[in-house]
Amino acid sequence: MTDWIHNYARNLKEKTEDLKRERRLAEDLLHQMLPKSVAKQLRKCQKVEAENYDQVTIFFSDIVGFTSIAASCTPLQVVEMLNNLYVCFDTRIESYDVYKVETIGDAYMVVSGLPERNGTKHADEIAEMSLDLVAAVRQVVIPHMPEGRLELRAGIHTG
């Protein structure tokens, strides 16, 4: 009977750890799709009200010549190239007061000043991040074209 209780307790502990791990993964995925403040409200079954932001700055970019680069690659090579690029970008933007809005294909969109307002810092944050990403893209290796380098076309809108 004692062995059965010990086994049951061990099994329960393992299942609890598995559940905690799965919950963390689910929260991480949710935070990749929604701002943390919105996700928190949704988890509490609260209504999420639309907000108006008077001051934000948006960064958007794409890869110069992406269509021709992609045409010379296999689908897996395109995915690997974009993954390398966006892992690099995602790591770098953590140093700035910005929120990644979206990545679609070779387009990358980041905003500062929302969902957390940051006064007048939004333009500075995006400008510094932009210079960092433009420099960083030169270091990203194209796996199937090691001699080639990516170029980033970037735009900023503030207001």
Image: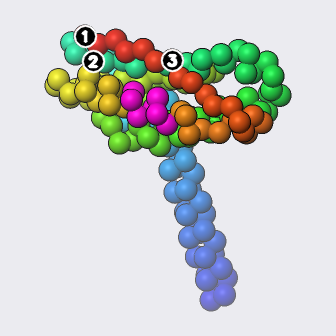
Residue 71 shown in magenta:
no
In which quadrant is the N terminus drawn?
A: bottom right
How packed mark 1 is, by other alpha carbons closer than 10 Å (few <14, some 14-19, many 20 or more), is: few
Q: Nearer the viewer, residue 26 or 87?
A: 87
Q: Quadrant of residue 123?
A: top left
**Mark 3 or 2, nearer chain start:** 2
How far, Cα to Cα, is label 1 from label 3? 21 Å
What residue would you read off at disc 2?
56
Identify the image's colour scheme: rainbow, by chain, secondary structure or one colour: rainbow
What residue would you read off at disc 3?
153
Q: Nearer the viewer, residue 127 or 82?
A: 127
Q: Which residues are magenta?
A: 130-136
Front of the two marks 3 and 2: 3
SS of the residue at dot 1?
loop
Query: In the rendering, at what x and y percent does residue 155 appear?
Result: 42, 14
Looking at the picture, which amino acid does disc 3 mark?
A: Arg
In the figure, 147 relative to 49: above or below? below
**Mark 2 or 1, nearer chain start:** 2
Answer whether labels 2 and 1 touch (C-beta < 8 Å): yes
Looking at the picture, which amino acid does disc 1 mark?
A: Gly
What residue would you read off at disc 1?
159
Query: In the rendering, at what x and y percent does residue 103 appear?
Result: 55, 24
Q: Residue at x 74, y 21 (%)?
A: 70
In the figure, 47 relative to 20: above or below? above
